[in-house]
Amino acid sequence: MDRKRVISWALYDWANSAFATTVMAGFFPIFFEKYWSNPNNINDSTFYLGLSNSAGSLIVAALAPFLGAIADRGSAKKKFLFMFAFLGILMTGGLWMVGQGQWQLAALLYMVGSIGFAGGNVFYDSLLPSVSEKKKVDFVSSLGFSLGYIGGGILFLVNVLMYQYPQWFGIPDGTVAVKLSFLSVAVWWAIFSIPIFIFVPEPSSEPTIKFREAITQGWLQLKVTFKEIKQMKIIGTFLLSYWFYMDGVDTIIRMAVKVGSSMGFEAGDMMTALLMVQFIGFPAALVFNWFASKIGPKNAVLIAIIFYTVGTCFAYFMTTRLHFFLLAGMIGLFQGGIQALSRSLFSRLVPEGKEGEFFGFYNMLGKFSAVIGPILLGTVSLVTGDVRIGLLSIVVLFIAGGLILSRVDFDEGERLASEYYS
């Protein structure tokens, strides 16, 4: 493997994870409730935030396979990555300008920024097979998530200090500090995205065609790919399991701070918990890769699903800060591992030359799961008047995903992928 390419690819995780930490998981949910939305109606703000998350995910889910097919036919993975990254960076920076009470504009910028974040990941993921050897794909995927945790964690730590001690940075108050944090994410994302565009080459398709022709052929190829996935039962079964269990993971990532706020935990406690997840997740993602090499990546993912299920049930009974921090530690141990190994497991099943369109379906199902989860949590919380019951409803998704994953034969899937063109 070319180390420069691997590190440059993994640095994009370092770059865009700042959006996942500071914006998606950290400040936006609290700021949306306390500053932009109505702080006197917590369940309504939970519903609107869940709706914004779901709408952005739905748009990416609908576009991902089509864009992936176009990118494969036109050798345009990096072009689409640049387009979505630029969109996310622009919208994130735009949050700086949103005034108090303007929840509609805040939700719109957040939703479009989420589209940039998630859409870029479709093409970032699809570049994984081109920078990694087959036997190293678990490690390279884990390296990306590991750098994402430490990179996002470092900037988030600075942002938390800006919020708690604005005078250290010459900032007038916490409100301005939060807005500047959104701006810092945009700058961080832009700067550390540069290496992937310079040092990671665009995988070429044979033959490479013009962009306009790629759109037409991409649409036709999408129909073919959908039929292929339906016929390739191993891929279809894995994607179905991924749909369910990643629903729970993504919902916890996006809604954990909002749920904690609704349960009455202080903002400082939630910031501490998020920092724990980031800095525990950095070594844990690499350690989990080592653990997977001993028991197999599929078994490692199943163990992570079990712990997520137990943790979500435990969260229902949370009453103290210690409970909250214990849960954060558990999530930090398994979050990066389940994401990294899911990506590398799927890459084993993808025929060479079809990475964009197949990862388009992979990300589509991941985003469709993020459509269901936040809406499920928000709706159950609104109907029952209890966010704890809403959180508990997520458990069924982990159980369904684990049961289906246990039936996937990855050795057979790899054999079929290698024989695809033979």
Image (tube, grey):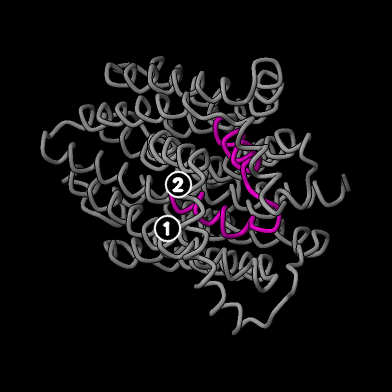
From which residue to which does the magenta span run?
338-365
Q: Of helix, strand and loop, which one carries label 2?
A: helix
Q: Of helix, strand and loop, which one carries label 1?
A: helix
Task: Locate the N terminus and report the quarter of the image it occupies.
Answer: top right
Q: Nearer the viewer, residue 323 or 287?
A: 287
**Is residue 73 part of the magenta span, yes or no?**
no
Q: Residue at x 36, y 58 (%)?
A: 58
Q: Residue at x 49, y 20 (%)?
A: 330
- Kindly identify which numbered label has been placed on residue 61: 1
Q: Residue at x 33, y 39 (%)?
A: 258
Q: Is residue 360 left or right of residue 380?
A: right
Q: Nearer the viewer, residue 86 or 294?
A: 294
Quarter of the image for residue 291 reads: top right
Dominant secondary structure, magenta: helix
Q: Nearer the viewer, residue 121 or 346?
A: 346
On the image, numbered disc 2 is attached to which residue?
366
Is residue 174 among the parts visible in the rendering? no
